[in-house]
Image: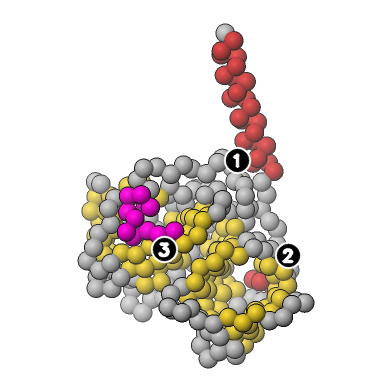
Amino acid sequence: MMQVTRFRLLALFFFAATLAQSQTCKSIPLDATDGVVASPANHKVLIETDDIRVIEVTSAPHTAEKIHTHLRPAVMITDGFSTGSLIVEGQPPVMHGPSPNNKPRVVFLPPQSFHHAENLGDTPFHAIRIELKHPGCSLSGQPAAALDAMDALTAAPLSHKVLLENADVRVLDVTVAPHTREPMHTHVWPSVMYAYQNSTMRYSTPTNAGEPSAPPPNSKPAPILLKPEGLHSVENLGDTTFHAIRVEFKLANPDSPLAPSTSASAPTTPAAP
């Protein structure tokens, strides 16, 4: 009897702890200085859920953004480089230039106070900014899902490399060489994938070999929202390397719906490496 009572007390404790966390975990609010509001010509929302907001950041040659803020931390994927400067109010300008190998540059950014960027070069600047609405906690109160033995890094290490990782995200560099197939693997966390170099691919599960899927002609890269994936494999049927950045969210709700404002424009798909 005492053992049953102790079990019930433990169950009540964990339930209360989960409920307390879900009640204290709040999204960071935005104000009129947010980049999407204060500098709308340079910031376009592509995807939004209760957990994340994905923004396309652009800057034409020889133009400057309006002064704005970013109050949430974010993963920034820069794939359109130009010579430019970042000017934070009260500080000297910080110059930046193209990536040495012209590959996308991926960084984790803390919240940013008043600033603006100026494109001093002759080519457009382009980036994907993935903001975390509630860093450090889960709205549901649930802990991050545990990785299994078939996680991509363990089961398919040749095509998955960690670019950065912290308590909120794991960012993977995903490559599939031409005419090769990954081993079966899983992704237990929801994610956003940005395929900046596409190819004709085939997505398969242990019970179903999918049909080849080729990118539309002249299509530009776009981020897609992905739910957790069970065992699957991707085969590159084309002559070019498939290359993508996958940002996994450890504390996001895997069933979080798209915001109404982005549901029409943000593609989702279960088929990803």
Residue type for callout 1:
Gly
Let me know if residue 262 appears in the view: no
**Which image quarter holds the C terminus?**
bottom left
Quarter of the view holding residue 70 = bottom right
| 3D distance between C-alphas at marks 2 and 3 | 33 Å
Is residue 71 one of those drawn in magenta?
A: no
How would you rate the neighbour count of disc 3 (Cα within 10 Å): few for under 14, some for 14-19, many for 20 or more?
A: some
**Which image quarter holds the N terminus?**
top right
Residue type for callout 3:
Asp
Which residue in the structure is indicated by mark 1?
141
Q: Residue sitting at 64 percent across and 71 percent down?
A: 36
Which of the two marks, 2 or 3, is nearer to us in this view? Answer: 3
Q: Which of marks 3 and 1 is nearer the N terminus?
A: 1
Percent x, y of residue 165: 51, 56
Question: Pointer 2 and pointer 3: residues touching (CB < 8 Å)?
Answer: no
Q: In this view, does 213 lie above or below 27?
A: below
First to last magenta residue range: 152-162
Which residue in the structure is indicated by mark 3?
173
Task: State how many labels appear.
Answer: 3
Q: Which of marks 2 and 1 is nearer the N terminus?
A: 2
Let me know if residue 125 appears in the view: yes
Q: Which mark is residue 232?
A: none
Q: Determine the residue located farthest toward the front in the rendered image.
A: 100
Position of 155 with respect to 172 (left or right) is: left
Percent x, y of residue 237: 23, 66
Q: Determine the residue located farthest toward the right in the rendered image.
A: 90
Which residue in the structure is indicated by mark 2?
31
| 3D distance between C-alphas at marks 2 and 1 | 26 Å
Q: Residue sitting at 62 percent across and 56 percent down?
A: 133
